[in-house]
Image (cartoon, rainbow, N blue to C red):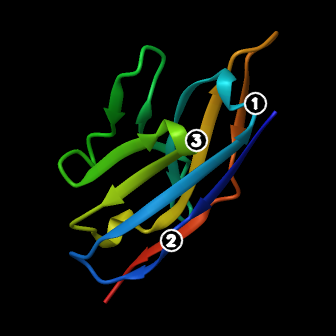
Amino acid sequence: QVQLVESGGGLVQPGGSLRLSCAASGSTFRIYAMGWYRQAPGKQREYVAGFSYGGSTNYADSVKGRFTFSRDNAKNTVYLQMDSLKPEDTAVYYCHADIRGDPDMEFWGKGTPVTVSS
């Protein structure tokens, strides 16, 4: 089992910045992929950024050049630095992790809301 707790969401003006954090606890040694998803009102949940099996970092095209994913293995924490925010970035942001097991499992955080508005 893995527990994921997000923080850092809030209200920001267009062009502003926010930094999201996701702290993992439990069987963190089993995590082989971890990242961020978001779900805007009335839309499906979509992938934003994260690392996958093998360690490569990936980004959705809509956030490339504006968002930066990073991780601190010692703290079992991943971050999402969001710059040049746009109103269309408004969503609930969820932390997600895949863990090895029999079978493999996935875990989600409860989400943190981000609102980009003037």
- Find the residue positioned furthest to the top: 102
Q: Secondary structure at mark 1?
A: loop
Is the C terminus in the top left, top right, bottom left or bottom right quadrant?
Answer: bottom left
Label 3: few (<14), some (14–19) or many (≥20) C-alpha neighbours in 10 Å: some
* Position of 97 relative to 109 (above/below): above
Q: Nearer the viewer, mark 2 or mark 1?
A: 1
Horizontal side, residue 42 vs residue 107: left or right? left
Among the two numbered marks 3 and 2 on one chain, the one whose residue lies closer to the N terminus: 2
Which residue is rendered at x = 55% and y = 49% of the image? 44
Label placed on residue 84: none
Mark 3 vs mark 2, CA separation in Å: 19 Å
Q: Residue furthest front?
A: 74
Q: Are marks 3 and 1 in contact (CB under 8 Å)?
A: no
What residue did someone put label 2 on? 9
Number of marks? 3
Give the residue furthest to the bottom. Answer: 118
Q: Dot 2, how many residues are within 10 Å of its Cα: few (below 14), some (14-19), or many (20+)?
A: some
Marks 2 and 1 sit apart, C-alpha to C-alpha, by 25 Å
Left or right for 21, reference 65: right
Q: Residue at x 40, y 21 (%)?
A: 55
- Front in this rendered view, residue 15 or 21: 21
Distance (Cα) linking label 3 and label 1: 10 Å
Q: Nearer the viewer, residue 45 or 8?
A: 8
| Residue located beneath label 3 in the image | 76
Residue 91 in percent (x, y) is at 49, 64
Q: Which residue is mark 1?
A: 27
